[in-house]
Image: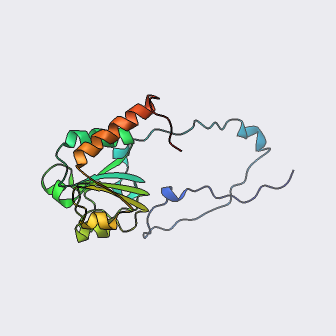
């Protein structure tokens, strides 16, 4: 046996933003043999999280809709099927399709998603500023010359509603085991 190291148990996502409060870290004295307590710790595995409860600025996968979306029910159901957090352009928010807290861009929320899927969003300057830190941007749009398509890492040119419907069908088929995994 050897002496226990000094420990700090903290997760970055639990930290509060820089503020005025001061904190103190103190050493914890563990009594007795800690090994006997380890058997009481049980990993219950991943916990299901509702993507719509994730703040937009913290979301890893965002499905964002704009003026090119006509079927908003399809948009919402596809986001749920994909496990994506929903976002929107200013136009979609101003038209009442999405709440203000789901607006992406300089006039909304700046996002840092790993994957940002923009459907029917032309790519106004303020929107592009808000997604500048996203790892991968995928654009679905009918206009091959729009700014969102130019910014995207991958673009699909076509009707957003039709492509979302096809994507939803493919995901459902894959989950049902009707499709082979593509490697």
Residue sitting nearer the eye, 24 or 181: 181
For residue 32, which quarter of the picture?
top right
Identified at 24% across, 39% down, the residue is: 74
Give the left or right position of residue 75, taking residue 67 as reference.
right
Identified at 55% across, 56% down, the residue is: 11
**Outermost residue, right side:** 1
List x then y, in percent, for residue 80. Answer: 34, 40
160, above or below 123, in the image? above
List x then y, in percent, for residue 93. Answer: 18, 55
Residue sitting nearer the eye, 82 or 7: 82
Identified at 72% across, 40% down, the residue is: 38
Residue sitting nearer the eye, 12 or 45: 45
List x then y, in percent, for residue 56. Answer: 34, 55
For residue 108, which quarter of the picture?
bottom left
42, above or below 4, in the image? above
Identified at 68% across, 60% down, the residue is: 27
Give the left or right position of residue 46, taking residue 138 as reference.
right
Give the left or right position of residue 24, taking residue 161 as reference.
right
Q: Quadrant of the C terminus?
A: top right
């Amino acid at each position: 046996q050897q002496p226990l190291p000094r420990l700090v148990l903290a997760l970055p996502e639990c930290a509060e933003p820089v503020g005025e409060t001061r904190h103190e870290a103190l050493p914890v004295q563990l009594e007795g043999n800690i090994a006997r307590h380890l058997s009481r710790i049980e990993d219950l595995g991943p916990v299901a999280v509702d993507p719509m409860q994730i703040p937009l600025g913290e979301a890893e996968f965002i499905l964002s809709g704009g003026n090119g979306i006509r079927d908003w029910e399809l948009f919402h159901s596809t986001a749920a099927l994909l496990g994506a957090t929903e976002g929107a352009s200013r136009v979609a928010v101003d038209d009442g399709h999405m709440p203000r807290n789901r607006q992406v861009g300089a006039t909304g929320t700046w996002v840092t998603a790993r994957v940002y899927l923009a459907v029917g969003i032309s790519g106004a300057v303020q929107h592009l500023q808000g997604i500048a830190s996203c790892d991968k941007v995928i654009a679905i749009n009918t206009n091959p010359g729009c700014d969102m398509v130019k910014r995207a890492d991958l673009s699909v040119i076509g009707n957003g509603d039709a492509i979302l419907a096809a994507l939803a069908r493919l995901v459902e088929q894959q989950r049902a085991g009707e499709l082979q995994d593509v490697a």
